[in-house]
Image (cartoon, rainbow, N blue to C red):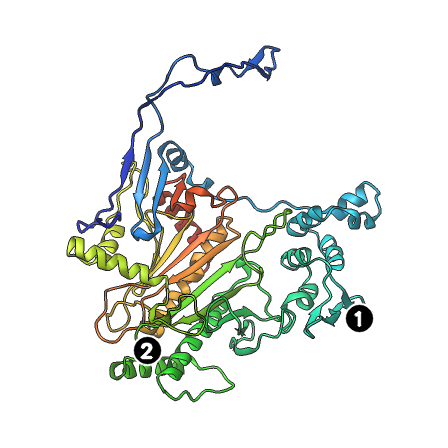
Amino acid sequence: MKPRSCVTPQKQFIYGIHKPEYCSRNLRESTRERSLGHFSTGEVFTNVANYPEENVLVNDADWIFEIPNPLSFRGSTYIDKEWADGSALTPQKISLPDPKEISFNKLLKEEKIPAEFLQSLPAPLHLALATTSTDPDDLMALAELSCRIEKDDKGVPTGLTYQKNSQGRVRAVISNHALFEAVANNPVLPDSYKEVMVLRPGAQGESEIVGEFTGSDNKTHSFEYLRRNSYIAGGHYAANMADDAVRYSIAQLSMDDMTGLRHLFYQRSFVRIADKIGISVKQNLEPCSADALEELREAILNALKRDNSLAGTTTLWGWNFGFDYAPTNYRLHASHQQVHQQYAMIPREVAIHSGSLNNSEGSMPAFGCGDMVAEVIENYFREHNSDFFDDYLGCIRNNIRMDERKDLESSLIIWEDKNSMLFVPKAQTSQWELQLMALHNKDGDIIGNILEADTASRASLDKGIFLAQKVLAGRGARMVTSIEYPKRIQNGKSPAQHLIYSFLPRLPQSPGAFSEAQLRYINGHYPEDFASVCRKELKKLDID
């Protein structure tokens, strides 16, 4: 089967256009005309339109663009032309409104109802209030309902009450875990409550702090936690803003914060690789400086030229920003609101078993999402005898609008420097998806993973990630999943695979249902119009 992609060797995006005209045969047996209500004039309004007498002829259905994703494993995007044409007229409306102010405490006072009435609300209403209230008094009262909070003589929280469970493990006394999570993750909850509930080291368990980054001006501070028994085999690490540098919104996030979080990712990855191939790392009980990190990276690259035992391993990096809880107890996004990132190393292979826990039957490749990009590259080259990413970049730079309008902007690029490019993909898998592509390092080599990114390239990637989050937050996005598609670490020549980051906002009216499960992504705007509003958003930021 030919690879499905909108990228072509002609360096022009291709896509399909559905122009439906069809007849729907009427197989209905009965007619049940009923009143639906009345017009303001008193005339009855019925459902007669729902009961056609003949077959239904459809001659003017909306045109639908079908855009194969450049990376075929990500399916296709479908854009309703009528919907997108409307968005093109007012692209600034591609945004979400700010949350409305909500105060239950104020309502109680206005209605002269005792404040204790909040306690008697049904649990689903407690959850709804915990996630939507903008009144600290509401949230402090809900926090008190969810757990036992210890306070000093002035009423300031100093800690929680703890107890040992039947296995001897120490746990906080929490009466309602869902409410505890919901209220602790509301940005409006006073920081003193956030600290004792979730932010103070140890409040969320015994995960060891094995890394730390402090900014030169002491305004940024982050911890690196080891998650021993992780859903990622071999453990993973979490870079969290520290309890003295609370960041519950992207508006609070600084470029220095991003540099610190990403430094912990680079440092941990390079040190783990160095340990595996026997390179001595001098740092112990202190972080690597930026210069030391670059020296270590170069030493690793030199060692890999002599020893390919680590070839095939890869990094894993991701970031769920934003938290929400539905009153029905469905958690809608990340595990916590505080800015954090997670990362790990994935081995080349994993042992194969079939019905036995201890007897292996060989090995298979351990999955890394960047492998799917490598498969696209290989399939594309076999089909076209052309380099995928060279053609992809050409398509981005030569982009043409699908609606043929010459009076509107056509560029998909939001920001770029010599090392990386932030852009709107032609086929967005989230309605507001952005992507960051690494370009070339100081030696002119393609950057396929963080090990191939020198100091300037890493700084460029950090800035691109920071700008992506700021732009999306500026449009109103409050929940964004960010993932990395890296090339595996390899010895010698390897496919020309660029490192890619994808930023995927969750929007209120896009729950991720059967269409998305089939890799069919529905969109209501042209990608060029979203790129345009993102560039305008970028101009609002005071960033060099």
Residue sitting at x 38%, y 82%: 276
**Residue type (three-letter) at the residue carrying disc 1:** Asp
Q: Distance between the residues labelled 1 and 2?
A: 54 Å
| Image position, residue 151 (x, y; %) | 78, 68
Q: Is residue 38 above or below residue 425?
A: above
215 and 38: which is toward the camera: 38
**Residue type (three-letter) at the residue carrying disc 2:** Leu
87 and 282: which is toward the camera: 282
Q: Name the residue under label 2.
A: 310
Q: Name the residue under label 1.
A: 152
Can you see residue 541? Answer: no
Residue sitting at x 42%, y 37%: 90
Q: Which of marks 1 and 2 is in front?
A: 2
Local crowd size for mark 1, using a 10 Å CA cut-off: few (<14), some (14–19), many (≥20): few
| Image position, residue 10 (x, y; %) | 17, 49
Q: Quadrant of residue 544?
A: bottom left
